[in-house]
Amino acid sequence: MAIIPLNVARVSQHLRSFQLQQSLTGRQLDLLRIENQLSTGLRFLTPSQAPADAAVATSVERRLDSISGVMNNLRTANSTLSATESAMLEAVELMRSAHNTALEALNSSTSAEERASLANYIDSIVGQAVSVANRRHVDTYLFSGHYGGGAPFEFTGDSVLYRGDLNRLSTLVDSDLTSDTFTVPGGSFFGAVSGQVRGRVDLNPAVTVNTRISDLRGSAGSGVRLGSVLVSNGTQQAEIDLSGAATVGDIVDRLNASMPPNLAASVIPSGIQVITTTGFASVTISDIGGGQAARDLGLISSGAISAGGTDLDPVLNLQTQLASLSGGAGLSLGGDIVIRNGNRSASVPVNGATTIEDVINRINAAGIGVWARINEDGRSIDVLNRTSGSDLHVEDTGGASALALGIRTTHGQVPLSELNDGRGVQTLPGDDLRIITADGTTIDVDIDGATTLQDVIDRLNAAGGGAITVGIGPNGGGLLISDNTTGGGTIRIERLNLSPAIDGLGLNVTPTGNQLVGEPVRPVRVNSTFTALLELRDGLRGDDTKRIQYAGERLQSVMESMLSVQGQLAAQSKAMSDRVARLENEETATRVLLSDVRDMDLTEAVVRFQQVQTALQANITAAARVQNLSLMDAL
């Protein structure tokens, strides 16, 4: 902080004025800089004033912006979780009220009129529960998943339709870019799509040149990890890099382009095959450097005439051709798939469908509250029921398309325990039923020990000895018993030993000609909050104590599931709150660091301001004296 020297010796007036101007200007700039620091509180206003500190400050500011963005996400997520938890508490309380009502209705002293009155109360609870399920927060439906087409639940009077999906909204919840979900879909909390016809047939698509490597489970079932393989014809060998191949056709092309002579690769329905083209060659294929490509592709071989052919087990995707299913034999679909959901039904034509996507789209377009999709294991098709309070049946008409696709509701392999909405078929010791044919033949059958519907069919046919033919109806609805005898009577079925077996098998029916056409006994019913409430309401209206009891049991089961999901959400909410507290601490520490780098120490600035001001005043005083010096002063 220089001051103009008084001893200027013998210098020109011009140099003396220049020195004076430079000194005064420097002090004034220092003073201006400190005044700016005092007014802004910042050590520097432009990066050029402190390049190193400016670089650090810029980095810290970016970090602070990132934390701020995450904090906004967390606040939104926390508020959504709080709103969801509040809605869950309301829903659980409604379920408790309904369960208490069921217990009250089962009291032997409760009259039919009182039960009818309670039904109206349950009907109001259904409406309140739907309202809770359609609750919004920040213009978002809490239980809709990714669905953005309006309210996810619709109460039609007889059922409750769920239009949402099973997805959850997610957001960044940490400065390290960690993401987490913060919503619960209606399918998880209310059980809105828990009922499904689970595909029972492995559709087994064939491998083609267009099959993607990512769609292969591989010979070991753990996918295909590409790398280099060593291929030999017995006299020559070649190292072939398969990395980066996108399809099976790509792999075959690389093999054929680089393998030693007299070897040829091709695609077969199960996978890839390498064969010798002359009798003088052999095939040896191995992995290189710990790779897994040859193993995963099923090509490991040592001196054989061929290699490969192992089933690479591709998964289904929407573009899978129907002609490639069943290992390449294909599925020829005919007739319509009949879907009945409650009091609605639709015939879904599948003629002309060429891909899995065609079939799924046609089922989903039926508009009766079902949702078809590829099963999570990638082997079959599932049909999910979106409608609480209604029974879903998938049957055939004029063909066997539903059976071929593995989505027909009733088939021989159905466990008896799955019939009647999971209540199974109840039997008693001894014979359970008697069939009397037109000629008077009596057939007594014991159902005890049967585990599948086919077991029951086999026992009935064996006991009938040709007098009757038992099977599943041609459309896949229920059991069909045909009378092969002639006589003056009519086929009929009777209960033995007070056994409820004929009810559980759907055979408590009136004959139609020479047949007993059983009722469908494998409804797919959504095990949801709304199914339980609607069952209770209808049981109360019908004064049906057994139905009320079943509804009460479902209410208890569903309520336990809801409480479990609520507990998981509470734990997630606690974890999210902990994240907020940690990020608030991180934000505070980052702001302190930014302040250390960028902010001005006011005490230091004031002292420097006084120093510069004193220096400036001294310069002015010195300048006044220097400017008054004459030649005589210098002599």
Image: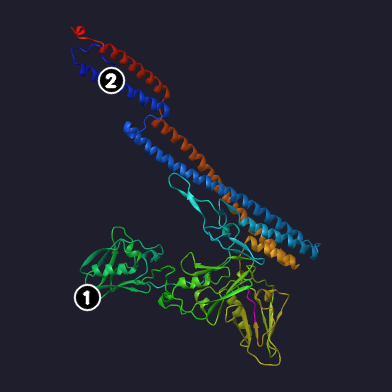
Task: Out of 324 and 435, give the one closest to the viewer.
Answer: 324
Assess whether residue 41 is covered by the magenta stretch.
Answer: no
Measuring 44% from the left and 75% from the top, which residue is drawn there?
Answer: 354
* Residue 622 occupies quadrant: top left
The dot on residue 280 is: 1
* Image quadrant occupied by the C terminus: top left
Measuring 62% from the left and 49% from the top, which residue is drawn there?
Answer: 86
Residue 303's spot in the image, x, y percent? Answer: 27, 70
Principal SS element in the magenta part? loop
The dot on residue 221 is: none
Disc 2 crowd, CA 10 A, few/some/many (<14, 14-19, 20+): some
The dot on residue 23 is: 2
In this view, 440 is above or below 81: below
| Horizontal arrangement in the rendering, residue 374 relative to residue 116 (left or right) | left
Q: Secondary structure at mark 1?
A: loop
Disc 1 crowd, CA 10 A, few/some/many (<14, 14-19, 20+): few
Residue 125's spot in the image, x, y percent? Answer: 69, 58
Assess whether residue 521 is covered by the magenta stretch.
Answer: yes
Q: Amino acid at mark 2?
A: Ser
Measuring 60% from the left and 66% from the top, which residue is drawn there?
Answer: 387
| Horizontal arrangement in the rendering, residue 439 relative to residue 631 (left or right) | right
Which segment did they paint magenta?
Answer: 517-522
* Image quadrant occupied by the N terminus: top left
